[in-house]
Amino acid sequence: MIPRDHPRYHSLVQREKLVRGYEQGIAVPEGLIAHGRGEAFDYLIGETTIPPARRAIRAAAAALLLASSPVISVNGNTASLCAEQLVSLAKTAGAKLEVNLFYRSSDRARRIARVLRRAGASEVLGVEPEAEIPDLSSQRRLVSRRGIYSADVVLLAVEDGDRTEALVEMGKRVIAIDLNPLSRTARRASITIVDEVTRALPLLTEEVRSLRGLDVAKLRKLASFDNSANLKAVLEHISRRLTELCPDF
Ligand code: PTJ
């Protein structure tokens, strides 16, 4: 039982959700380690949504609204942490949901699809993938033809770098949510939101709602994004924060 007034209440609740996800066969043990790496970066960032993340969220919302076939990719970690938020974004942005796993098993894919349907999804792709991402050897290559394979914009979170690169190579616009600004995913994605996934998703959904109705020219302007410059701003934020935290170093 985590006391509500614990200063790191939210973070501890996230850990419990992931552990429950692991016990229910939704997340893999490796996912717990990946989450720990994310937590370390979140600590450096200050466990808050920083201005560069806000800018990326705005660009991502515009890109989703401009997309003709947007897809949200779901893995074991994100299904455990934020199934409702993923479904809510998919509905708001008119995006499809697809299960895509690094440590793939049909049983886990089915369990994750069930979690998403229980959270309100009417359709979940990727349980019986019938297409492959070229030049990718991991299990993540297995995708749905109607989903990730033919998507023009793919949103992914808590993801390793290989598939991000492969999707960009296929000519897709990739929106990544990743707490590590130095990861291959963060550097190769078209728009990287350096933020904790459960903080970023509701903000992104809200931004999609608020930008809806803007004309295409305005959306295109918002969606054009210098990802490298934004990642540099994140690193500058971390560096400033370290100096503030340890002025004597
Ligand atoms: O469910 P599967 O089989 O698809 O496996 C999923 C994992 C997470 C095991 C797999 O994608 C993996 O190994 O990921 P990596 O290579 O460890 O990368 C995960 C990235 O997400 C790292 O850069 C972390 O810093 C970041 N991260 C971890 N937790 C969060 C996060 N970013 C945002 N929010 C988080 N909660």
Image (cartoon, rainbow, N blue to C red):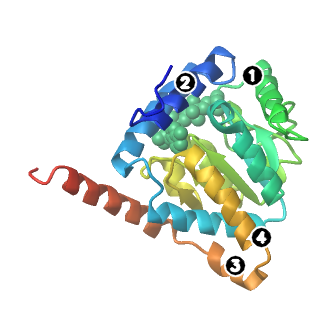
Q: How crowded is mark 4: few (under 14 residues within 10 Å), some or many (20 or more)?
A: many
Q: In this view, does 50 lie above or below 33?
A: below
Amino acid at the residue labelled 4: Leu
Q: Position of residue 246 (x, y in %)?
A: 16, 49
Disc 3 and disc 4 in contact, CB within 8 angstroms: yes
Q: Is mark 4 within 8 Å of ligand 1?
A: no
Q: Residue 66 bears which disc, if any?
A: 4
Q: Is residue 138 visible?
A: no
Amino acid at the residue labelled 1: Arg
Q: In which quarter of the image is ligand 1?
A: top right
Spatial separation of the CA atoms under disc 3 and disc 4: 8 Å
Q: Position of residue 192 (x, y in %)?
A: 55, 58
Element at badge 1?
A: helix
Q: Name the residue under label 3.
A: 220
User: Which residue is found at the position 79% from the left and 65% from the top?
Assistant: 67
Q: Is mark 3 within 8 Å of ligand 1?
A: no
Q: Residue 16 bears which disc, if any?
A: 2
Name the image quarter holding residue 117.
top right
Spatial separation of the CA atoms under disc 1 and disc 3: 38 Å
Q: Is residue 141 above or below residue 204?
A: above
Disc 1 and disc 3 in contact, CB within 8 angstroms: no
